[in-house]
């Protein structure tokens, strides 16, 4: 395999002006969490698989001890009578050039399938520990920005100032070349750990846009799980601070 | 050379549903030790050589001062009337993309030669110093897992949890695309040093599967060799610990 | 996208022996500042856009929250009746090989457009903090060197001794293969920060060569801006030196 | 430029069983010094130039301020009625894959030109400071090894044990595929600095093989130059040792 390769799992798929929602791994796994939650809740069906020499050269082990290559996959579901494609996956490209190659492959496929609009989902790292209930957006046209603002998405002048790295950004920027509308929605997140809380917030916005409601129990459980992880990390840190204020037994041994 | 290149050393080779055993360098060199031991004991003959720009850009010097490029090689032998191909070599790909390219080349060749099943051999790093007499497996179908369990191979839920990096994993995962059965057998090993003991254990399982018995003297000698290496490393460590508990002469010079 | 790609924004452009001025990001951003200043002052029009998998895999966010891919662009303007093309951009290639690929693309385009001469603009890092009002040159013929000397450009034996990295150098060196005259003009700069002062000086030389005068207010404002940045950095440094000469409160706590 | 490119500087060159001597930059620059010395002393003429995207993306500045791309070059000279090609250059490939690509290009050219034998020249790093007047060899056939031994070249069992990295090794190892004789001659060198002394020694062996004598004044001057550099480095080191044995004034200030 010298190039990224698309595997068509179904002979023919008929779509009516589908939209494409992209949730690949990234900051806080926010985009991935939202897209995979929707795939699961909408019972979307896998229709394409993508392998690439730009993915890490490893395989993943399933619970039953069978293995699978690292891949990206495209699922097809329906939301409010609307055909929706979901692009999700194990990894993004591990090389710079691979990002461009895969992005081109996805946009060509989108054009071929008649996709009318792309939503890429991701996280926006604030570097602060406090959670903010904000979804930030960028898009490839001013009309689209106006439309998406109505859903409470914030568009802040020239932000993210450092640009957007990876598929979420490239797909939106290059969509214009294929004459596609595209918007990137980013849940704000501290960015240090998996952030299902930010995902929950972003999911709310996406559901509003799609005009659907979905069960969010699975995501809520992940929120609780992460809260307990964070709690333990904090306790450990407190402990270390406490220990740092007085000599440890080991220190005393050497001093004495 | 811009792509990996296969050199056919024999005009025609006739094979009857051969199996392919892969033992390339990896953790503890376990897979390489087993496969090369079998090549030697079964007097297998070299039938293909592979060069690749993805191997390190260096050459190896033979005992007689002739040189050879870094390569992978395929040998053909017979085990219990069964044609067996062995893929062994000096190095795996040095680049991520090369792993995918070489893996594709090997699977195409396997399909062309009518290979019915692939066994990839490797080591499973435990990170612990104690040796465990365990062979772990993953495979590309549930039927195969059931079959291989009978030989005492352990299949542990979702393990290795970090996936499998390199040819051993990729060949098994992508075998399904070529409609081939494939299993990866991993000898447990501390993973820090060459581990002929783990190789001996894995060799036992492979011989059982092949229905053969082979002389293991060469491998036993390597076990003794490594035991003496480890012994020396331990002594050195003990010495250092001892020296660490009291000031060295050099320390005293500075203190005094 | 597997290769660098040229987008033609205009069906036909008619040029008469145009010259090409290249100002891509580099040391002190000197070349970029000069070329972009000229694009703006001469109201040059964008005629080509270049995308490349060798650019960083990210997108840039405009003030209005629309996004654009990282790109290089070619603008067309007129200076003193002379057609002038300007090659400017967000980034140079992020990979070694990409530099060669892009350079080849630009030289082929230059040949196709009948470019008669190339000026690449850059900075020459002195590593000293004091500003020097010097423009250094190298070129691809001795005749050209003589001609350019007349504009006060200095040509110092075998300098830069470390060679010139990136597009500025490659375009000049490979121009000879396309039978093009080419010269690289480098404003001397400390090289640590954006250096609009060095750019102002280089702009003077370029305008003299083109036989034009342009408003430099925008660049002067950037000079003032940077002077205030440097002033603040110096104050901060002074403060730190002052603090370093006597024990801080924190130090005293540990000593006491 | 996406691939390494050969520029033919002469329309036709007629050669009679030429030999090829390769001296590219490497350990101690030993091979480069010898080959370039011979090019100069035999008044060899440049007949090919090679550019490659695998060379560093920079250009070199000549004394007269013209620039040239990084390149490898092939010169043609005569030694004792024998046609001799010299492959020399500014850099070897900066990427692993480029080494293989360039090596293939050179071997194809050698075959096309009817080259009967290749000598690659290099340095063998001992890591010791004392100079040894030894030339080590490896070759691609046992007959060749016997022949070359007669010139005082040492062939030590399985040495260099770490293999040979880069063009010197690859050309010898892959020559067999083109049915060419090839030998690598390595001057022993500490390996830390440019080593014209080791080059002088290697030059002696090469001249003996070619059956010629050449003036070595230029190389002797470089030996003296390096001896004075080493002298200065030693003095500096002595000084530092001396200073290390007693507290510096700065130390005293802190202790006091």
Image (tube, coloured by chain):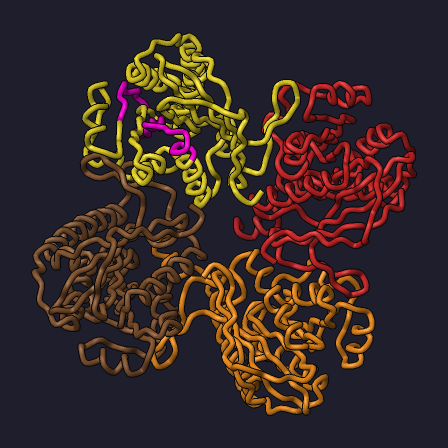
Chain colours: A red, B orange, C yellow, D brown
Residue C111 painted magenta? yes
The one nearer the camera, D165 or C86, is C86
In the image, residue C222 above or below residue B16? above
The one nearer the camera, C167 or B15, is B15
Residue B149, position as x, y percentages in the image: 79, 77
Which quadrant would residue B98 be assigned to in this image?
A: bottom right
Q: Is residue D22 visible?
A: yes
Q: Determine the residue positioned at 80% across, 78% down.
A: B147
Residue A43, position as x, y percentages in the image: 89, 46
- C174 displayed left or right of B85: left
Residue D170, position as x, y percentages in the image: 37, 66
- D81 displayed left or right of B118: left
Q: Is residue A234 visible?
A: no
Q: Which residues are magenta?
A: C109-136
Residue B236 painted magenta? no
Residue A25, position as x, y percentages in the image: 70, 43
The one nearer the camera, C203 or A186, is C203
Which quadrant would residue A120 be assigned to in this image?
A: top right
Name the quarter where the N terminus of chain A is drawn: bottom right
- A136 displayed left or right of D57: right
The one nearer the camera, A139 or C81, is C81
Task: Count the numbered circles shown.
Answer: 0
């Amino acid at each position: 395999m010298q190039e990224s390769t698309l595997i068509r799992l179904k002979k023919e798929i008929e779509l009516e002006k589908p939209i494409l929602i992209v949730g690949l791994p990234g900051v806080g796994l926010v985009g991935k969490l939202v897209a995979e939650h929707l795939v699961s809740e909408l019972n979307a069906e896998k229709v394409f698989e993508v392998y690439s020499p730009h993915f890490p050269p490893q395989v993943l082990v399933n619970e039953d001890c069978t293995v699978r290559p690292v891949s990206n996959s495209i699922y097809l579901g329906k939301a409010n009578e609307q055909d929706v494609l979901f692009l999700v996956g194990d990894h993004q490209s591990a090389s710079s050039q691979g990002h461009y190659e895969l992005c081109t492959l996805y946009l060509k496929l989108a054009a071929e399938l008649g996709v009318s609009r792309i939503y890429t989902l991701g996280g926006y790292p604030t570097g602060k520990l406090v959670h903010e209930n904000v979804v930030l957006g960028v898009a490839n046209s001013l009309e689209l920005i106006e439309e998406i603002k109505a859903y409470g998405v914030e568009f802040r002048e020239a932000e993210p100032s450092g640009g957007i790295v990876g598929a979420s950004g490239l797909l939106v920027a290059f969509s214009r070349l294929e004459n596609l509308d595209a918007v990137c929605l980013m849940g704000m997140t501290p960015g240090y750990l998996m952030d299902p809380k930010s995902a929950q917030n972003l999911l709310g916005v996406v559901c509003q846009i799609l005009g659907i409601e979905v069960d969010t129990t699975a995501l809520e459980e992940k929120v609780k799980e992460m809260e307990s992880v964070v709690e333990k990390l904090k306790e450990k840190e407190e402990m270390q601070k406490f220990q740092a204020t007085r000599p440890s037994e080991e220190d005393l041994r050497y001093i004495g």
